[in-house]
Image (cartoon, helix red, strand yellow):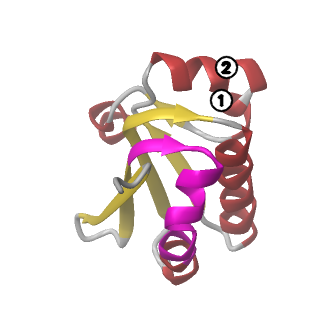
């Protein structure tokens, strides 16, 4: 059976920042598949900025949005930040509808993020 959501992770240069790439659908079933792995990444993160690359994320629902908000709160409490990068049109529409862009930084692409850093 094919997974609904696949994660990959890479460090961003020497900064200690980490990019987590999402591929698939972030709904209840997708989240359940990556919950343990994603929790470990977030809890072990010791950089300043954690980036979620959403370029290959096809769908997100309230479960995924709730998780992003939870990670954002956790990181801000620790003096860190969550940045969302590269949402497709559907995901960006969801973010706009609920006001995510007023809560945390969202960039159209990794290049946009790196150029505005």
Tally of marks: 2
Q: Indicate the position of residue 92 as horizontal and vertical percent values.
A: 55, 22
One can see residue 20 in this view: no
Q: Earlier in the sequence, mark 2 or mark 1?
A: 2
Q: Which mark is residue 96?
A: 2
Q: Marks 2/1: CA distance?
A: 7 Å
Other residues around mark 1 within 10 Å, as few (<14) / some (14–19) / many (≥20): some
- Left or right of 70 on screen, residue 110: left
Compared with residue 62, is residue 50 higher up or lower down, i.e. above or below? below
Asked whether disc 2 touches disc 1, contact meaning CB atoms under 8 Å apart, the reply is yes
Which residue was labeled with disc 1? 101
Q: Secondary structure at mark 1?
A: helix
| Left-right relation of 72 to 13 | right
**Residue 35 is a magenta residue:** yes
Name the residue at 33% across, 68% down. Answer: 15
Towards the viewer: 104 or 66: 66
Residue 115 included in the magenta stretch of the image: no
Give the percent coordinates (x, y) of residue 2: 34, 53
Is residue 19 visible in the rendered image? The answer is: yes
**Magenta stretch?**
23-39
> Looking at the picture, does residue 19 appear above or below residue 15?
above
């Amino acid at each position: 059976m094919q997974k609904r959501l696949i994660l990959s992770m890479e460090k961003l240069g020497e900064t200690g920042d980490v990019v987590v790439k999402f591929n698939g659908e972030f709904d209840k079933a997708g989240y359940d598949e990556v919950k343990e792995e994603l929790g470990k990444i977030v809890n072990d993160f010791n950089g300043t900025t954690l980036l979620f690359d959403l370029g290959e994320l096809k769908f997100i629902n309230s479960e995924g949005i709730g998780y992003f908000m939870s990670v954002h709160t956790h990181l801000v409490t620790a003096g860190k930040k969550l940045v969302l990068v590269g949402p497709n049109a559907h995901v960006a529409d969801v973010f706009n509808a609920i006001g995510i862009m007023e809560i945390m930084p969202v960039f159209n692409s990794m290049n946009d993020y790196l150029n505005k850093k």
